[in-house]
Image: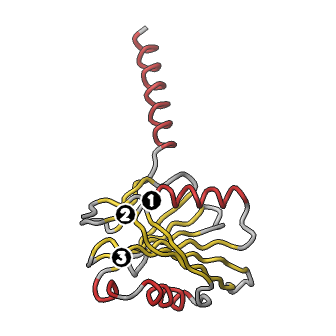
Amino acid sequence: MRRQYWLGFVLVFGLLFLGSAQTRADEVRLPVDGTPAFDFVLPPGWTHLIDDNGNLRLTRENHSSVMQLSMITGPDVKMSYPDMAAAILKAAGATPYSSSGPGSIAGVTGQQFQSTMTNDSGVHINLLVVLAKLDDEHTVTLATIQPNDIGKDDAAALEHLVAAVKLVGLK
């Protein structure tokens, strides 16, 4: 009887452990230490890494879209939104922005800029760069990159990811 009880305990514990491992979501933060910072739970279906430039790159597991978050500090914070967007798009190899308007990142008002580019495989890509000034020392960027022909489910997943982004430690 004790053995059956123990086996039942092991099975229940194992199922609970496996269930929690399968539903465990990754918390992502940029910068890793300090504030202000991006800090949110990564929805399922996305991977993330911090690149050599300190940007947080989030990629859909099927590679249909990418979102990149950055925390800009230093003298670049003094740049105007249009100048900053132009520099970002130029560095990405994209065309100059074709339109701009109000935008926001995690509820912080800023400005967004739309552009396009064609990758090495000939795929036409839409870029959206959103810039928001947090204070005199920090500007955040959120860029989405997706092909023109992105599917509805992948577009919805990207929208869900953008909505999941949170900022902490704001003054």
| Mark 1–mark 2 CB contact (< 8 Å) | yes
Q: Quadrant of the C terminus?
A: bottom left
The label nearer to you, 1 versus 3, is 3
- Return the disc, 1 or 2, that comes first in the chain's sequence: 2
Residue at the image position 42 percent from the left and 75 percent from the top: 55
The image's colour scheme reads: secondary structure
Name the residue beneath numbered marker 2: 38
Q: Amino acid at mark 1?
A: Val
User: How far apart, in angstroms, are the residues tagged by discs 1 and 3?
Assistant: 15 Å
User: How far apart, in angstroms, are the residues tagged by discs 1 and 2?
Assistant: 7 Å
Disc 3 on helix, strand or loop? strand
The count of marks equals 3
Residue 102 in picture, x, y percent from top left? 51, 72
Residue at the image position 40 percent from the left and 80 percent from the top: 52
Name the residue beneath numbered marker 1: 165
- Return the disc, 3 or 2, that comes first in the chain's sequence: 2
Given residues 46 and 168, the one toward you in this image is 168
